[in-house]
């Protein structure tokens, strides 16, 4: 069985961003030489995630709105996690 592993790093400019990583994943697949099997794309940070959906701005805004309603960023005091000096309790 063949396997291939590559780490990709992405720097964001905003607190929450949607980044289409399809071209980078396709490049990794091409580099691997593997033509059949499964590919695992995993975010290796607790406040990051990977999801598969349309890369469409309206959908991204819907996600932004939904996430802010689900776990609003402010007030920071709303999250006990932030008492440790961080401000990402909403992302946990």
Image (cartoon, rainbow, N blue to C red):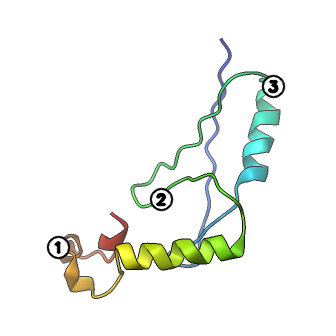
Q: x, y percentage for residue 26?
A: 78, 43
Q: x, y percentage for residue 77?
A: 20, 84
Circle 3 is placed at which residue position? 33
Disc 2 crowd rating (10 Å Cα; few below 14, some 14-19, many 20+) is: few
Which residue corresponds to the image point at 32% horizontal and 77% vertical from the top-left? 87
Q: x, y percentage for residue 40?
A: 59, 36
Would you say the residues marked 2 and 1 are in contact, meaning their CB atoms lie under 8 Å apart?
A: no
Pick whichever, 47 or 63, lies toward us.
63
Q: CA distance from mark 3 to mark 1?
A: 47 Å
Q: In the rendered structure, which disc, 3 or 2, sits on the residue that comes first in sequence?
A: 3
36 vs 8, left or right, is: right
Determine which of the numbered discs, if any, sits on residue 48 in the image: 2
Which residue corresponds to the image point at 27% horizontal and 84% vertical from the top-left? 76
Q: Quadrant of residue 86?
A: bottom left
83 vs 49, left or right, is: left
- Name of the residue lying farthest toward the bottom: 75
Which residue corresponds to the image point at 62% horizontal and 60% vertical from the top-left? 10
Pick whichever, 80 or 62, lies toward us.
62
Q: Quadrant of residue 67?
A: bottom left
Q: Establish if 49 lies above or below 15.
A: above
Disc 3 crowd rating (10 Å Cα; few below 14, some 14-19, many 20+) is: few
Determine which of the numbered discs, if any, sits on residue 80 in the image: 1
31 vs 10, left or right, is: right
């Amino acid at each position: 069985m063949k396997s291939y592993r590559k780490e990709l790093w992405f720097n964001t400019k905003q607190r929450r961003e949607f980044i289409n990583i399809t071209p980078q994943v396709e490049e990794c697949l091409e580099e691997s030489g593997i033509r059949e099997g499964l590919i695992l794309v995993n975010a290796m940070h607790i406040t990051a995630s990977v999801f598969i959906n349309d890369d469409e701005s309206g959908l991204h805004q819907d996600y932004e709105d939904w996430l802010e309603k689900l776990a609003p960023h402010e007030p920071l005091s709303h999250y006990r996690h932030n008492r440790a000096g961080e401000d990402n309790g909403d992302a946990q």
